[in-house]
């Protein structure tokens, strides 16, 4: 395949992944909502993009995810995001965008290193698990860094009965994070393995 054809294919595949992210972000496809928690599925196209388009492609997919999150924070914010917007809208942009872009980048780097070391299909599942885990760590870490002492979070801490950042993070996302890691890890791992056979990469 010529260099031009390869670049064209890359751009087409990247555009397709971004289109999937946009579709999932603005429809119920991106989330599994239950009475107790909401599982985010948008990390699936991010990790698949990171697998097949490399760290840079993963970062672009993560950036697309982050921009949709910030758009939602502006147009239909949750109670938490609405409270954060009154504190500092720039911090909200950082919270929504930067962790998601880095999530795609780091997932791409992890998958690249794994495939260099081994061609075992389990590498797809490890990468699939890493993406929602990294997303949770980076998002909550940034939230604690920027908003830990704002009134909304202080009230949450008092309600949850926690007194330090780690306990706060575990109390807020503990069960949800486990569901996301399991769901996204299995689905994105299976998708990655299947696409590898189809694309013969």
Image (cartoon, rainbow, N blue to C red):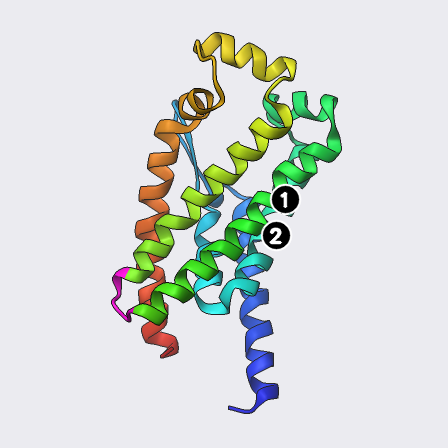
> Residue at the location (55% across, 64% down)?
57
Q: Does dot 2 land on a helix, a strand or a loop?
A: helix
Marks 2/1: CA–CA distance? 6 Å
Mark 2 vs 1: CB contact within 8 A: yes
Q: Does dot 1 land on a helix, a strand or a loop?
A: helix
Question: Does 121 appear in magenta?
Answer: yes
Highlighted magenta segment, given as a residue range: 118-122
Instruction: Residue at the far bottom: name it.
Output: 2
Q: Which residue is identified by label 2? A: 63
Q: Residues within 10 Å of mark 2 (few under 14, many from 20)?
A: many
Q: Which residue is identified by label 1? A: 97
Residue 149, horizontal then vertical, whole percent: 62, 17
Question: Does 58 appear in magenta?
Answer: no
The answer to which quarter of the image holds residue 147 is top right
Q: Residues within 10 Å of mark 1 (few under 14, many from 20)?
A: many
Q: Is residue 151 above or below residue 26?
A: above
Between residues 71 and 173, which one lies in front from this camera angle?
173
> Residue at the location (34% across, 36% down)?
179
Q: Magenta residues: mostly which secondary structure?
A: loop
Residue 87, horizontal then vertical, whole percent: 72, 22
Q: Is residue 37 above or below residue 59?
A: above
């Amino acid at each position: 395949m010529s260099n031009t054809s390869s670049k064209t294919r890359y751009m087409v595949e990247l555009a397709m992944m971004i289109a999937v992210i946009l579709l999932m972000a603005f429809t119920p496809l991106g989330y599994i909502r239950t009475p107790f928690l909401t599982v985010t599925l948008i990390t699936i196209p991010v990790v698949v993009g990171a697998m097949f388009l490399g760290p840079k492609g993963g970062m672009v997919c993560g950036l697309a995810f982050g921009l949709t999150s910030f758009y939602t924070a502006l147009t239909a914010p949750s109670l938490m995001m609405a409270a954060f917007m009154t504190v500092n809208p720039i911090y909200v942009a950082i919270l929504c965008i930067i962790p998601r872009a880095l999530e795609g980048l780091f997932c791409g780097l992890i998958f690249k290193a794994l495939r260099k070391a081994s061609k075992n299909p389990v590498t797809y599942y490890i990468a699939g698990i890493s993406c929602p885990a990294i997303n949770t760590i980076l998002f909550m870490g940034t939230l604690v860094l920027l908003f830990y002492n704002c009134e909304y979070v202080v009230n949450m801490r008092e309600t949850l009965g926690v007194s330090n950042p780690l306990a706060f993070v575990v109390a807020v996302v503990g069960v949800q994070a486990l569901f996301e890691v399991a769901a996204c890890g299995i689905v994105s791992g299976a998708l990655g393995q299947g696409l590898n056979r189809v694309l013969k990469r």
